[in-house]
C-alpha cells in the first residue's frame, strides 16, 4: 500500500514538475523572441543615426 502511495505521489510530482518546466520554457522562449525583435529595431535605429550624422 505504501509503495502504491509513493509511486502515485512520485508520478504526480513528476507531472507537476514537467508542466512547470514547459511553462517556464515557453515564457523564456517568448521573452527571447521579444528581445531579438528589440535588438533588431535598435540596430536599425542606430544605422539611421549613423547615416544622419
Image (cartoon, rainbow, N blue to C red):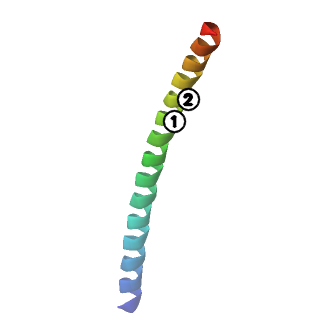
At a point 38% along the width and 66% down the height, the residue shown is 16
> Based on the displayed image, in which of its 4 quarters is residue 45 positioned?
top right
The numbered mark at residue 39 is 2
Left or right? Give the position of 45 relative to 6: right
The numbered mark at residue 35 is 1
| CB within 8 Å, label 1 to label 2 | yes
Where's residue 28, x and y in %?
Answer: 48, 47
Where's residue 40, x and y in %?
Answer: 55, 24
At a point 37% along the width and 84% down the height, the residue shown is 4
Left or right? Give the position of 44 relative to 6: right
At a point 40% along the width and 53% down the height, the residue shown is 23
Q: Is residue 15 above or below residue 46?
A: below
Q: Nearer the viewer, residue 11 or 27?
A: 27
Q: Nearer the viewer, residue 17 or 1?
A: 17
Left or right? Give the position of 32 relative to 52: left
Q: Is residue 19 above or below residue 6?
A: above
Q: Secondary structure at mark 1?
A: helix
Amino acid at each position: 500500500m505504501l509503495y502504491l502511495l509513493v509511486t502515485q505521489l512520485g508520478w504526480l510530482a513528476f507531472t507537476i514538475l514537467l508542466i512547470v518546466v514547459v511553462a517556464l520554457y515557453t515564457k523564456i522562449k517568448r521573452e527571447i523572441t521579444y528581445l531579438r525583435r528589440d535588438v533588431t529595431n535598435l540596430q536599425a535605429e542606430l544605422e539611421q543615426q549613423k547615416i544622419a550624422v
